[in-house]
Image (tube, helix red, strand yellow):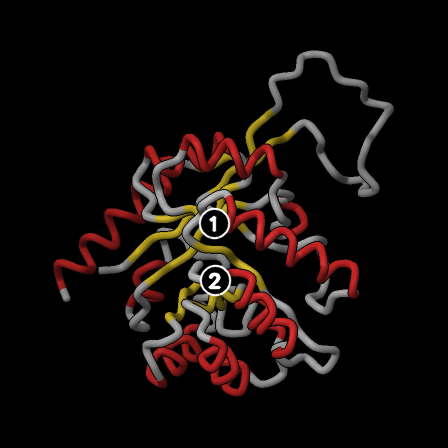
Amino acid sequence: MVLLEICCYSLECALAAQRFGADRIELCAAPLEGGLTPSYGVLKSVRQQVTLPVHPIIRPRGGDFCYSDGEFSAMLEDVRTVRELGFPGLVIGILSEDGQVDMPRMRQIMAAAGDLAVTFHRAFDMCQDPHEAFDNLAELGVARILTSGQQPSAVKGVSLIAELIARSRVPIIMAGAGVRADNLETILNAGVEEVHSSAGQWVPSPMRYRNPGLSMSTDPNADEYLRYAVNGASVVEMKAIVARFRSSH
């Protein structure tokens, strides 16, 4: 059985993903940053209202995955919070300055996570040696690795994804980045058991009054009157493709 994980950036997104048939949710904030740690309020409301398995991301900022002592301390606290709230898993990734899995810090993360299922996210795609990283993560006992095969999208990195799956079924290799209905079958043919998609769309803000001469963003091209939402039709379509693939194999 192939599992479909949907990346969600709000309670509303998570409820929509659940309604349209997602199997699991990765919960994040800040889509333009590629996903940051959700606030405590969002974590608590999602935990109370969403019945699907939800794995929050632990990422204190955008950019690289080599963290200061202060950032790492905050990450450990966030891991403990996610565990205390009763989530079944979390998503995280920490690298050394040399582009390797930061084993000492990841050991602390694994200890803090306890019996939570830990997903090592696409920090894996920034590792110098994916095979060494895979072996290190297997040693740590992470549940899965989210990867695009070290390419801009999973469909471009499908050969490395297939190669990693052939090495071992543990950790699980979950293909993500640019996964859509029109390329999903190609990715499934690599042998993946789990796929990750945002299935997202930008929708207009309901605000009628807008001040065109003022922006809250440091990006002069940012449209602050757009909001990220799950595209329910996309989730339904991908689930149907997974079902057809499963019945034919």
Q: Position of residue 159 (x, y in %)?
A: 41, 79
Secondary structure of residue under mark 2: loop
Residue 55 vs residue 4, the one in the foreground:
55
Give residue 141's quadrant in the image.
bottom left
Q: Position of residue 118 (x, y in %)?
A: 47, 63
Q: Is residue 194 left or right of residue 226?
A: left
Q: Is residue 17 above or below residue 54?
A: above
Q: Is residue 215 left or right of residue 18?
A: right
Q: Quadrant of the N terminus?
A: bottom left
Q: Which residue is located at x 52 percent, y 66 percent?
A: 120
Q: Residues within 10 Å of mark 2 (few under 14, many from 20)?
A: few
Q: Quadrant of the C terminus?
A: bottom left
Q: Is residue 246 left or right of residue 153?
A: left
Q: Which residue in the structure is indicated by mark 1?
A: 26
Q: Which residue is located at x 41 percent, y 75 percent?
A: 161
Q: Position of residue 172 (x, y in %)?
A: 37, 70
Q: Which residue in the structure is indicated by mark 2?
A: 114
Q: Position of residue 148 (x, y in %)?
A: 49, 68
Q: Nearer the viewer, mark 2 or mark 1?
A: 2
Q: Which residue is located at x 62 percent, y 73 percent?
A: 126
Q: Earlier in the sequence, mark 2 or mark 1?
A: 1
Residue extending furthest toward the top: 208
At label 2, the amino acid type is Gly
At label 1, the amino acid type is Glu
